[in-house]
Amino acid sequence: MTTILERVHSGRQAVGERWRGAPRWVRWALLAAVIVFFYALPNKEFYQYLGPIPTPGANFTQVLFTISIYVLLAVGLNIVVGFAGLLDLGYFGFFAVGAYTVAVLTSPSSDIKTLWPWLLVVPIAIALTMVSGVMLGTPTLRLRGDYLAIVTLGFAEMIRIAAVSSEFLKGQRGFNQIPHPPGQYADGKPVFGVLDARPYYWLVLTLIILVVIGVRNLTRSRVGRAWVSIREDEDAAQLMGVPTFKFKLWAFASGAAVAGLAGALFAGKQNFVNSQNFELLNSIIILAAVIFGGSGNIVGAIVGGGLVAYMIERFRSIELFGIELYEYRFLVFGLVLVVMMIFRPQGLIPNRRRAAEFKDRRKEVIVGE
Amino acid sequence: MDFNELFSNFGELTTTGLTIGAIYALVALGYTLVYGVLRLINFAHSEVFIAGAFAAIWTWGAFGLNQDSNVTGFGAIVFYLLIAMLVAALASAATATVVERVAYRPLRKRNAPPLAFLITAIGASIAISEAFGIYTRRLPESGPRLVSQDPLFHVFGVPINPVQLLTIGGALLMMILLDMFINRSRVGRGIRAVAQDPNTAALMGVNKDRIILMVFVVGGAMAGVAGLLYDVRIQTLTYSVGFLLGLKAFTAAVLGGIGNLRGALLGGLLLGLVENYASAVFGTNWKDFAAFAVLVVLLMFRPTGLLGESLGRARA
């Protein structure tokens, strides 16, 4: 068992060394190839040659859109959990805020009947989610980490209950006829239609690339260094003059903003939003994705988000010994979380610094164990 | 907003609130005990409760009781209650032990950061809850109506029924027993010592691992009894109710001051009352919302809870 693990480990390390040792142009070329692959993926002419990868149970382009939303959310949550080390269990709540903002301001079935176009509402949705992030963060970020986790969980549940119960948010009936993103082809057909999910997927993919560039720059700046210092040792960071509260709030708000964007995109694609879109388990799935991929590492978060969302969809319509695998998806997630934390807390593609933190702590002496 | 509803039914809202609050309090004890000793929110505790609740219902099922059976005779009822309580407490304690051994102990051994514990706890919680969900095909299980819910007597015009008496009385009794156990027994002294300073306690010869296991077992047994009382009161059980109840019990523990045993009782009863009053004023849909709002507001103004953190006391 250990030898296999070690072999896998050394193999992966060799890949990592190779990647870091490669000339710059090779890395760029590889990255470009990966990006081109993902842009090409939703075309049937392309994915039909990919063997077992497309999902048999559902339309593969639709599935790709769902996966892309999960990846975007994972990238956002990675800022909060991975960089700043704050455990946010209610991240999907911000997604809900984003989606509902779009729904309320654009849908003809909403009570205020503003009927604004989608594009105008997106920045408002992002701003509102940021504000809700700050509102939630201000009282709770002063507390210990695990209190924050529970309060965020409570927050997401409050949003869900409000969505179910309040007249204004329509509950199960929901909002319909939410406008799609704008744009027309030369022949007058809208780019973002009802049947074809490809344009939406491409839109989200493009936004993911932009967000990743933004987050990457942010983490290499003063802000990113402050986040890492808070994650490693909050007290030490404070003593060194890092305004920890301010930067924690920043991380919380940036993460929320990304979730708000994802929510707005979701509402624009789906055209319908109701209270059933926001089950609490979704927050946990995204958290599992980030941890699974490797929190603190953007590539890890992307891979984790993609793999987890893909696995859920791939489980659909697979039967093993006469039982539907899809039924077991959450059971599998729970077990994956436990096993990952015990055997590989740094995730599949770890952030090297964070992996070192875990290793460091292991060496500290504990009495009586 | 409907304050008439609140004032006209104030007495009944109070008694039902105290009943559900007593169940919260028993579950909150588990959170408080584990938190007091390990400084860890045992997120999987809600599933420990569910395990006990299912065990009680299935025990009755094994005796051939279902929702239609009509049990008469005081002796028979007491027998069924006691046997179900025993099985539920054992099942919950066993679940808690498994969670401790599988999910927490390996992490403790390698001194993992606190958030790692919370993540394994969530994982364990989902896995157990889903296992019950798959086993019951996500359908509710029903149990017999052992204790009558017809009013037994009136206090100031407020009807009191046997279920309420049993729940509140049972919860209080368990509390008193636990309080005595922690403050008088040898193991209890060990628990207090580890809560105060784990390393020093270990140096003084307290077997830390055994004490931690005991904490999970005792907290689990309390949750098992809570599961039984829940079954007696509601008679049906779905695999997913544990999550919400667990979250509320945690709120109750924080409300009273987490790590503080008497605080858990106070917090549970108060939370039961608050959410019942809120549901009368704002409508039943908003009941859970009120409970979480209490949590958020509380953490804003008094994160140590009403009675403050104690059990160990000395640790900041």
Image (spheres, coloured by chain):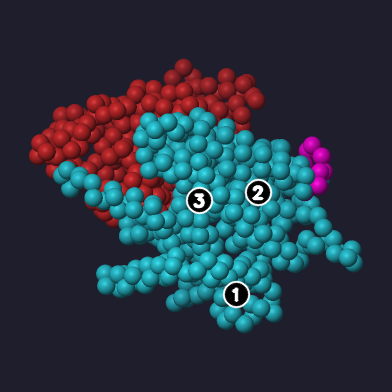
Please tell me whether residue A117 belongs to the stretch shown in magenta. Answer: yes
| Numbered disc in front, either 2 or 1 | 2
Amino acid type at mark 2: Leu
Q: Return the disc, 2 or 3, that comes first in the chain's sequence.
A: 3
- Chain A image colour: cyan
Q: Colour of chain B?
A: red
B183 drawn magenta: no
- The span picked out in magenta is A109-118
Residue tagged 2: A261
Is any atom of residue B59 visible in this view?
no
Task: Say which mark, if any, is on residue A78.
Answer: 3
Dot 2 and dot 1 within a common chain: yes
Give the mark, 1 or 3, whose residue is nearer the N terminus. 1
Q: Quadrant of the C terminus of chain B?
A: top left
**Residue type (three-letter) at the residue carrying disc 3:** Asn
Q: How many marks?
A: 3
Label 1 chain ID: A
Q: Please report, as a chain letter, where disc 3 is located.
A: A
Give me the residue at 79% from left, 52% from top.
A179
Chain ID, mark 2: A
Residue A54: assigned label: 1
